[in-house]
Image (spheres, rainbow, N blue to C red):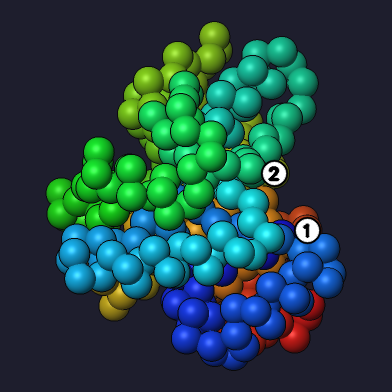
Amino acid sequence: MKIFLDTRDLIDLFKGLPCSVDDFRRCLQGGGHALILSPTVVFEIAAPLDAPSSHAEVVKLLNDLESLPLVYIGDTQIPYRELRSAIDSHTAGREYVAINPLMTRFDETILESGSAPTSLYPNYGLAETVFEIWQRAPQVFHWPSELVNRLRSGMATDRSMASPPTVASNFRKKIRLDLELDEISPPPCRLDDFADWIYETPTRCPGVRLSYDVYHQLRRNVGDQPSASDFGDFAHVQCVPYVDLITLDRRMAVYVQRATRGWANDPSGKIRHDLRAVVREL
């Protein structure tokens, strides 16, 4: 199985909860399983690099991670690659062709196209690659305040609408904005028709669809105010279709379960609340 652990559970693992890194490695190797790591998780773990006194601790954590059977997932690439595949499929008049966002090197997960600067160093381990990225672009280790403010502002606007559009019809606006932000040429058809085609079947662009529907579950809960951590949560959510098991906190797990109610092959069945539940299944 391909197992995705969120940052909280990886930190617990480093603390020996509910088992040691060595015991978890044996569980993975004995069953032919792999741990899935995303840039979002790795950068959250390595964020203490901002404090020089934490460098040795971060190196140890990254080395412990690299001692496990690993596969990497390009979580930030998922929307771009899904939409490109959807355009190609829709234009050719065929069913959507699923993408494979899993990779063997961490630095392959960073960019949507082209090679990461660290690809010049094929022998770099995870810690060396992360340190190189931190030296070149330390801002990627934290969610910028303007993004957090944009999320909060957008959520407030959506919640204040007296007669909001349906989630399905608003998806058209989302797809139009996503294509613009990712600088993807639109398909040679009515964009609304293309967006409707994606939305009618959840397995078309499943990461995009799932994170969108989860956002609207959060929007409906007016007592739940978005925070910086939600960016990481949404990044984790769009990985759900591409893994076998994933840990999410209970709040986000509930939103996913509500969003996927009625889906064929409901992906929320992959969710576990903590590492202890995952270990019991290995």
Is residue 181 positioned above or below 217 on the image?
above
Q: Secondary structure at mark 1?
A: loop
Q: In the rendered image, is residue 130 in sight?
A: yes
Work out whether residue 27 or residue 4 is closer to the camera in this orientation and state it. 27
Q: Amino acid at mark 1?
A: Asn
Q: Residue at x 64, y 65 (%)?
A: 68
The quadrant of the picture occupied by the N terminus is bottom right
- On the image, numbered disc 2 is attached to which residue? 203
Q: Specify which label sits upstream in the sequence, 2 or 1.
A: 2
Q: Amino acid at mark 2?
A: Thr
Picture coordinates of residue 233, whole percent (x, y): 43, 63
Q: Residue at x 64, y 71 (%)?
A: 271
Question: Residue 265, labelled with which disc?
Answer: 1
Position of 238 with respect to 31 (left or right) is: left
Work out whether residue 147 or residue 69 is closer to the camera in this orientation and state it. 69
Is residue 97 positioned above or below 277 on the image?
above
Position of 222 with respect to 91 (left or right) is: left
Picture coordinates of residue 60, whole percent (x, y): 43, 69
Q: Secondary structure at mark 2?
A: loop
Is residue 172 positioned above or below 269 on the image?
above
Q: Residue at x 32, y 68 (%)?
A: 56
Q: Answer few, some or many: residues within 10 Å of disc 2's Cα (few below 14, many 20 plus, some between 14 and 19).
A: some
Is residue 184 positioned above or below 233 on the image?
above
The quadrant of the picture occupied by the C terminus is bottom right
